[in-house]
Amino acid sequence: MPKITKRIVDAAAPDEGRRYIVWDTELRGFGLLVLPSGVKSYILQYRTPEGRERRATIGKHGTWTAEEARAKADEMRRSVNSGRDPLDERKERRDALTVAEMLDAYVGSDRFDQKAASTQAIDRGRINRHLKPSIGRKTADTLTPGDVERAFAMIRDGKTSVDVKTKQRGRARVTGGEGTARMAVRLLSSAMSWAIGSNIVKSNPCLNVRIGTDGSRTTIIDDADGYARLFRTLDRLEREKRVRPAAADAIRVIALTGSRRGEIADLRWRQLDLKRGLITLPPREHKAGRKTGKSRIIGLPAAAQAIIARQAGGNADDRVFKPARGDGRISLSKVWDLVRKEADLPDGIGLHGLRHSLASHMAMSGAEAAEIMTALGHSQLSTAQRYVHWAQDARQGLSERAASVALAGLSASGGNEKAGVVPMRSGS
């Protein structure tokens, strides 16, 4: 009997009258099964600890190389030698939940139901468009950090991109990208944490996967001139009929209130009290509500009240800012891309940057973290505290720039040493 190599496999001709096995000379039980049809498969024959003889099919030649099949057979043989049965383990593996099935269970759980409706819709999209295509067929309880890293790379590199027809708006383009990949893995991690508590899996493979950060939150609209360009551009694009009035008004309200995009895009008439100038989002209808159990109150400046008041009315549960077609949430992403470019706003600023801009200017004006937390609806004081720290750093930078002319004069006069200022030396 020969050692099974590619040359031996290629030379093994089918016999029309029978099936036969070429046994390997080096690895006990490892063989090549040749069928009359010409199909060749790698196998491992072994005895269980109870003495029962079993034959496991490793895979077909062409799908597996001889070297790969040998390595798998060696792994299975070592499993047998340690008292295990590879075929029984394979059956248990087939019966175990896949990642797709685990995600479906998560979507049907009380944990998922506690999320705001808008968050649920976004999460379902990430699951169906990105996680299931990239990792859904894997078994949930054997998922590894390497599997998660490969899924992250697939989503980041656009390999889960699709362009499909939908009933609601006609077409959905799913493009992927690094930010999308990052949010998808975070969602997977949340689902795995829930699955641990539900005794579906034993560990969370997402915890040790590096997915990068969301980047700096210092990209904001710097001053009144930037806001003037934003509002002038919205006015012009609306006059030119390049942007629908409802979309332009939704962006205006986001800029004026610092609200999350979903809070305004999904805003219902029943959540409004224009007489008092307030939006009230119940705990189940905003992001932080599931953690705090409290409603989110958004104060409306007079300009924002006027913008909302001019929208076409509707029933209590109708959305204030209506989409071009259907009754779903208004889409703002493409509109914002156009507005940002034509208003010459920073490249890195998204719609969420309008929220960061308002929080940053509040901090620069001396607002405390608790005030920012209340205004923006954060669930944790530490989140708002970041803006205060940023404002302190920014004020320090402003003071350095403001003093630069005076410092130049001080240096020219030879006054550095008198003032105790030691000039930096090259290479220090």
Image (spheres, rainbow, N blue to C red):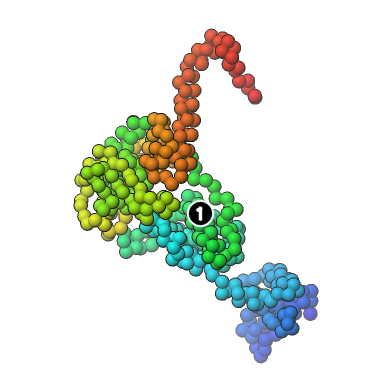
Whether residue 22 sits left or right of residue 331 in the image: it is right
Tell me residue 327's x, y (percent).
27, 59
Q: Is residue 390 above or below residue 26?
A: above
Whether residue 216 sits left or right of residue 59 in the image: it is left
Q: How many residues crowd around disc 1 within 10 Å: few (fewer than 14), some, or many (20 or more)?
A: some
User: Which quadrant does the N terminus fall into?
Assistant: bottom right
Q: In this view, does 95 lie above or below 262?
A: below
Q: Which amino acid does label 1 sit on?
A: Arg
Q: Is label 1 in a helix, a strand or a loop? A: helix
Whether residue 97 sits left or right of residue 87 in the image: it is left
Tell me residue 259's x, y (percent).
35, 44
Q: Residue at x 63, y 81 (%)?
A: 38
Occupied quadrant, residue 69 = bottom right
Tell me residue 354's x, y (percent).
37, 40
Q: Which residue is drawn at 46% across and 25% down?
A: 398
Query: Farthest residue in the top direction?
Result: 413
Q: Which of 38 and 396 is in front in this view?
A: 396
| Number of numbered tags placed on the structure image | 1
Whether residue 181 sits left or right of residue 51 in the image: it is left
Q: Mark 1 points at which residue?
A: 186
Q: Which residue is drawn at 64% across and 86% down?
A: 36
Query: Farthest residue in the front direction?
Result: 293
Occupied quadrant, residue 17 = bottom right
Tell me residue 334's x, y (percent).
35, 49
